[in-house]
Amino acid sequence: MTNKGVALAVGPEEGQSFWQPQPSTGYVTVKISPYNTPNDLISAGVQVLEPGASVRRHAHERANEILFVFEGEGKAEIDGEWHRVSQGSTFMVGRYVQHYVENDGSVPLKLFWAIMPSGLEDWFRAIGRPRTPGEPRPAPFERPSDVAEIQRQQRFVNPK
């Protein structure tokens, strides 16, 4: 008997998608998570940052993350060191490693992310607004007023 693993194919516009608040103006689409597979070891998806947008400096208490730039350019600070990022750039951030990403280019910066263990999808859902592919981008909006509590629940490490 073979214990076959999970198989899943997700199309370009498939997955739960959420508009993100400032300063991460853009959206996230969760492609793989415990919500669409029986696997809770990894979640993965795409984040699109509009020009001038950024992912705030943060670290994960219990997760390791890999980010891959597949379109656009920008800069990233990883554990206090700055890096230029562009198509093909890949970086890994372990637990408690502070990191920040900014789109300082003129086109959207598109990142593929994978996080182990899963959980980042719950963060995007908690701070974002549901997105339907093809709909116009909403006006920029602020993070929820209880974002500190959401960060605590999601086991984020406070930025330095």
Image (spheres, rainbow, N blue to C red):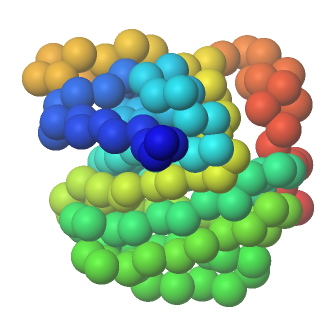
Q: Residue at x 46, y 45 (%)?
A: 2
Of the pair 155 and 78, the residue shown nearer to us: 155
Viewer-side residue, 115 vs 86: 115
Question: Vertically, is 100 above or below 121?
Answer: below
Q: Is residue 119 left or right of residue 63?
A: left
Nearer-the-camera pick, 2 or 84: 2
Question: Looking at the image, can residue 59 be seen?
Answer: yes
Q: Residue furthest front?
A: 1
Residue at coordinates 60% horizontally, 73% vertically from top-left?
A: 92
Vertical arrangement, residue 129 with respect to residue 58, above or below: above
Q: Quadrant of the C terminus?
A: bottom right
Instruction: In the rendered view, tell whether residue 76 sits above or below residue 141.
Output: below
Residue 143: quadrant of the picture: top right
The part of the image, by quadrant, that contains residue 45 is top left
Where 136 sits versus 52, above or below?
above
Q: Position of residue 44 (x, y in %)?
A: 46, 46
Residue 105 at x, y percent in the picture: 28, 68
Identify the residue shown where x is 63% and y is 29%. Answer: 123
What residue sits 24% from the left and 39% below the top?
A: 9
Q: Quadrant of residue 150?
A: top right
- Picture coordinates of residue 5 (x, y %)? 46, 43
Q: How many marks?
A: 0
Residue farthest toward the left in the current orientation of the protein: 134
Residue 26 appears in the picture as rendered: no
